Amino acid sequence: MDVHAQKGSYVSLDELRQQAFPEQSVEWQTLWVTQPQREVMEAILGRSFRSLRVRYWGYEQRTVWVFEEVGKEMPITFGVIVDGDQIDDVVVMEYRESRGGEVRHPFFTRQFQQLKLTAEQPPRLDGNIDGITGATLSVRAMTKIATLALFCHQLTPFSADPDPSIVHEDIKQQASAP
């Protein structure tokens, strides 16, 4: 078996934007990360999160997030579409690992659809994700990123029902700034 058979670029940024917003022209938005938010993000990821800001697209109650997370050895680029505070879709945009690429197929990614966050801290997905033999670390990476995207969505003005425990007044002011 060719060890590079799993690797590939599958969805471009433009294709992801078009999938999420087929009728709208959307511009990049910026979420400025505060220290309390960073602490939750780091708990979700199980590692440090150094970015001061996160870029995303948003329209009405829909946001799109692009994050990278290491599977076993290499980063995997994920796109997560959140609509109405639940996951609409998760796509593998670029896969760089030599195995575990099955996580990019719809039979697997459909499990994430309609999942929301739990109220516990740190937040988790409110449903179970069945793993794939040989792709355990890729599944973990996708689960972390899906959770992170839902958390970040709650911090935006596009959230249907912002969590008052995490959406502070300074965040609301950031969101309304031009």
Image (cartoon, grey):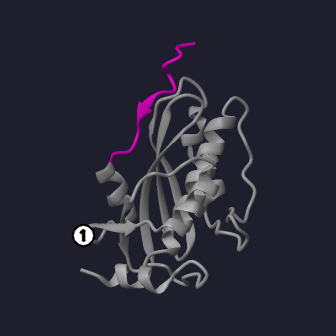
Q: Residue at x 58, y 55 (%)?
A: 42
The answer to whether residue 160 of the structure is visible from this angle is yes
Residue 124 lies in quadrant: bottom right
User: Principal SS element in the magenta part?
Assistant: loop
**Is 11 colored magenta in this rendering?**
yes
Furthest toward the top, the residue is 1
State whether residue 52 is above or below residue 62: above
- Amino acid of disc 1: Ser
Apparent side of residue 91 relative to residue 15 in the rendered image (left or right): right
From the viewer's side, name the closer residue of 170 and 20. 170
Label 1 packing within 10 angstroms: few (<14), some (14-19), many (20+): few
Instruction: Give the residue drawn at x 61%, y 31%.
Output: 100
Relative to the observer, which residue lies in front, 170 or 75? 170
| Relative to 101, residue 91 above or below | below
Q: Residue beneath label 1, please?
A: 25
Which segment is the magenta one? 1-12
Q: Nearer the viewer, residue 28 or 6?
A: 28
Residue depicted at x 49% and y 39%: 76
Q: Secondary structure at mark 1?
A: loop
Q: How many marks?
A: 1
x%, y% of residue 103? 59, 40
Q: Is residue 98 magenta?
A: no
The location of residue 144, given as percent across then percent down, is 61, 52
The quarter of the image holding the C terminus is bottom left
